[in-house]
Amino acid sequence: MANASKTNSSKSSDKDPCWKGYEQVGMKSKDGKQVPNCVPENKSSSKKKS
């Protein structure tokens, strides 16, 4: 029961694993596990310039 409350309270949005002001640009390997690669929004938006 403690595990269920921990996962629900740790993130405000289930579909966005990143902090506010960050966005996911893919996955990366950390300690042998796949985790979201979150970068600041202003850095990832610079790739979209044409």
Image (cartoon, rainbow, N blue to C red):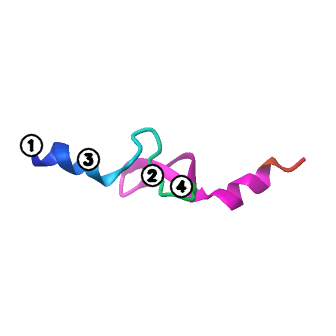
Q: Is residue 6 left or right of residue 34?
A: left
Marks 1 and 4, the one that precedes in the sequence: 1
The crowding category of the residue bearing disc 2, from other C-alpha atoms within 10 Å (few below 14, some 14 to 19, many at least 20), is: few
Query: Alpha-carbon distance for marks 1 and 3?
Result: 11 Å
Crowd band around label 4 with a 10 angstrom C-alpha radius: few (<14), some (14–19), many (20+) = some
**Which callout, 1 or 4, points to the residue nearer the camera?**
1
- As helix, strand or loop, the secondary structure at mark 3 comes to helix
Residue assigned mark 4: 38
- x and y percentages locating residue 20 in the rendered image: 51, 57
Q: Kindly identify the residue that appears in the image at 57 percent across and 59 percent down.
A: 21
Amino acid type indicated by mark 3: Thr
Q: Is residue 3 magenta?
A: no
Q: Earlier in the sequence, mark 1 or mark 3?
A: 1
Q: Is residue 21 left or right of residue 34?
A: right
Q: CA distance from mark 1 to mark 4?
A: 29 Å
Q: Measured from the top left, where is residue 3 in percent x and y?
A: 16, 46
Q: Which mark is residue 1?
A: 1
Mark 3: give few (<14), some (14-19) or many (20+) Cα within 10 Å: few
Question: Disc 3 to disc 4, how far (Cα)?
Answer: 19 Å
**Residues at marks 1 and 2, CA–CA distance in whole angstroms:** 29 Å
**What residue would you read off at disc 2?**
29
| Element marked by disc 1 | loop
- Which amino acid lies under the numbered mark 4 shown in the image of this protein? Cys
Q: Is residue 31 magenta?
A: yes
Q: Amino acid at mark 2?
A: Ser
Answer few, some or many: residues within 10 Å of disc 1's Cα (few below 14, many 20 plus, some between 14 and 19).
Answer: few
Per the image, the residue denoted by label 3 is: 7
Position of the N terminus by quadrant: top left
Tell me which numbered mark, 1 or 2, is placed earlier along the sequence: 1
**11 vs 14: above or below:** below
What range is drawn magenta here?
23-47
